[in-house]
Image: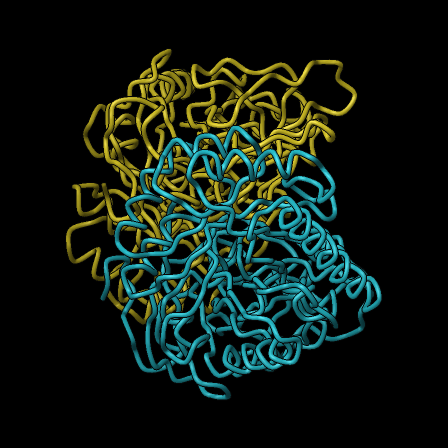
Chain colours: A yellow, B cyan
């Protein structure tokens, strides 16, 4: 038993206390292979975003066990990956002065950690740190979040402030966040091309002003998969693709069979008068993320499969309280509610892998088509 | 520095790396005092639900530092509280056979742990465990989740199955989950009275059939506060009231000044063209919970205050990605966007304290009206 009361590394998916998170490395490996083949064909490097899996064990599947270039969403991830030998890391959340001491500490350990910024004030703070920290300038391609537009003169002001202070203009970084709301192949291809064009335009503006700007970084799981031309781009960031989820399946980036991560829960009761099956997996087990609510097909809190991974016809997790899930047949469907006695274990296919995984401290690792649990892998938590 | 790279127990709210969770024990104590005075007036015991705070340190404020009766949502909570001396615990999620070994292990440590069930099959499994485990029968008062209706004959079948097998009918438990959707004082009072009436009716049915059923347990934070008569009820469960949140303020159970828990984040950028201030607190810091979206006033991902707790006029966290928050003025308001330079720390008042707290491993403990951090308290995680 570990500190949370779970038996560690027990034999099968029938053993750990529910709810728990199961992942299938064979599916992860297939998902990685598919993206890698696509990017190899386009001649760009994969700089995987580890914010989804937050696991050095999952990341080991990315680069044949060795450390490759990665993107992180927290300095805690950077530190955990540095501890196991990763040396090429981009911290892709806008830097603030207070965090520079942790950045500097990592760089002094030999990590080539680059930071992100989109303002002159951040550039001045970085330059004031005085340790030659490389910076990527965030460029906005679709109004989704932060970044400067590629034709905004502040782009050059930022670069000049960096260089004048002794920091380094590593290049530009773009994230096509609006691509998660794309509908159909044509919109996804257009989002990928827009992301590429903005990134290259910004990099060329920097180079015309005399900066090297060697890195042109783009990426989201949808645009990474749907890009057909990445001329001028040097690297692609994507993270969700290792596990995929129902939002990605709804966009059309994968099928439900590609989902490598599921939540295992146990049936705890029934309300036949309401057509409900109750489980011990509520929003604490799945997160509150309902990303598919904005898509054509709302999958509730998730699709439901048996322990072998076979989906029950039109069975959804339709509601959640903290430690209770409600399963019911999709509204409008004529499918029959399956007979699942108290104690039956089911898998929930989640809306959003990043959010669901964040509810857990560890993965239970399985083999495809098997209930055998082969390992327990920890997740990185906190900031 | 702790394992996540946070400095532990540093001096002020300006020190820990953001995002982090701040709580104010003086406000917690005031919230506890208010509910306790109300319940004392009604002559019932408080059996606090520890699922919100998941902290033995917060719970110590409930019962003058000693162990009192508690409700838990996970066996991990039961085990952690047993470790520090709590001996009267109700596990308020329907029991499944596989978890009985952990229940028995706790009982063998001297913990009077009662379980919850609402079916004959669960009762038979409990009886088969053969160790005199006390059970509360879950009764449904509003169709919210599980439970048997108080007039359903299966109530007596369950009790008979328990007794015949050597288990114990401890009583009944009701949770008025629909009260979270109540609108106004009259609806809340009606929900509280309905919850009481269902619980008492079920207990009387059990007693008429010869069962002791000494415990009549009701509770949710809204009904606990709005009940005006709890005749026949022996105990009230509530959990959220220790911290409160914007959903509770929207229902009218508290004011925003009663919120004891906030998320501290740092400004990382600006998009003046969009009226946005960006922070390093995304949904990983707040959770995806948007409970106020169903209320009269949608508070987005939360209201925004300065580090001293003073709210900015009509400033909301309007959007979130994993590690990015977007602050903007409430749609329709004429308030001006405040000038918050990169590096400024702000507090987010969350929609749902249970869900936001679940994103963290610890609390940073402050004093009211002060930025001093006096302690770091761990949270219980997992199942």
Q: Nearer the viewer, residue A14 or B39?
A: B39
> In the image, residue B90 lies at what x, y percent?
46, 54
Number of labels in the image equals: 0
Left or right: residue B291 versus residue A348 is: right
Residue depicted at x 31% and y 60%: A167
The answer to whether residue A238 shows anywhere in this view is no
As drawn, A242 above or below B308:
above
Which quadrant of the rendered structure holds the C terminus of chain A? Answer: bottom left
Residue depicted at x 52% and y 28%: B121
As drawn, B121 above or below B327:
above
Residue depicted at x 66% and y 27%: A328
Q: Nearer the viewer, residue B341 or B192?
A: B192
> In the image, residue B369 lies at what x, y percent?
50, 88
> In the image, residue B24 lies at what x, y percent?
47, 78
Q: Nearer the viewer, residue B94 or A21?
A: B94
Which quadrant of the rendered structure holds the N terminus of chain A? Answer: top left
The answer to whether residue A125 shows anywhere in this view is yes
Q: Quadrant of residue A19?
A: top left
């Amino acid at each position: 038993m570990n500190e949370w009361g779970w038996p560690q590394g027990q034999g099968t998916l029938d053993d750990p206390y529910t709810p728990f998170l199961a992942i299938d490395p064979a599916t992860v490996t297939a998902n990685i292979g598919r993206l890698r083949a696509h990017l190899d064909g386009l001649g760009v490097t994969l700089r995987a975003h580890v914010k989804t899996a937050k696991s050095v064990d999952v990341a080991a599947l990315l680069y044949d066990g060795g450390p490759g270039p990665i993107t992180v969403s927290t300095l805690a991830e950077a530190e955990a990956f540095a501890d196991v030998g990763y040396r090429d890391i981009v911290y892709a959340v806008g830097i603030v002065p207070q965090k520079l001491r942790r950045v500097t500490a990592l760089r002094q350990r030999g990590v080539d950690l680059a930071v992100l910024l989109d303002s002159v004030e951040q550039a001045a703070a970085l330059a004031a740190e005085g340790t030659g920290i490389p910076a990527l300038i965030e460029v906005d391609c679709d109004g989704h979040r932060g970044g400067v537009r590629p034709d905004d003169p502040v782009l050059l002001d930022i670069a000049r402030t960096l260089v004048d202070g002794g920091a380094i203009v590593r290049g530009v970084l773009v994230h096509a966040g609006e691509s998660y709301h794309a509908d159909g192949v044509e919109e996804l291809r257009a989002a990928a091309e827009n992301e590429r064009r903005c990134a290259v335009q910004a990099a060329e503006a920097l180079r015309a002003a005399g900066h090297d700007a060697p890195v042109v970084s783009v990426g989201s799981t949808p645009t990474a998969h749907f890009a057909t031309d990445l001329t001028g781009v040097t690297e692609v960031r994507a993270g969700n693709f290792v596990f995929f989820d129902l939002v990605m399946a709804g966009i059309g980036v994968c099928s439900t069979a590609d989902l490598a991560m599921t939540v295992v829960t146990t049936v705890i009761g029934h309300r036949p008068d309401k057509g409900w099956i109750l489980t011990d997996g509520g929003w604490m087990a799945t997160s509150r993320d309902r990303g598919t609510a904005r898509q054509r097909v709302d999958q509730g809190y998730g699709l439901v499969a048996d322990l072998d991974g076979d989906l029950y016809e039109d069975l959804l997790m339709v509601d959640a309280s903290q430690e209770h899930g409600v399963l019911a047949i999709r509204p409008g469907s004529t499918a029959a509610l399956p007979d699942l006695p108290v104690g039956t274990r089911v898998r929930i296919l989640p809306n959003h892998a990043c959010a669901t995984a964040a509810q857990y401290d560890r993965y239970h690792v399985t083999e495809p088509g098997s209930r055998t649990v082969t390992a327990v892998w920890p997740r990185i938590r906190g900031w």
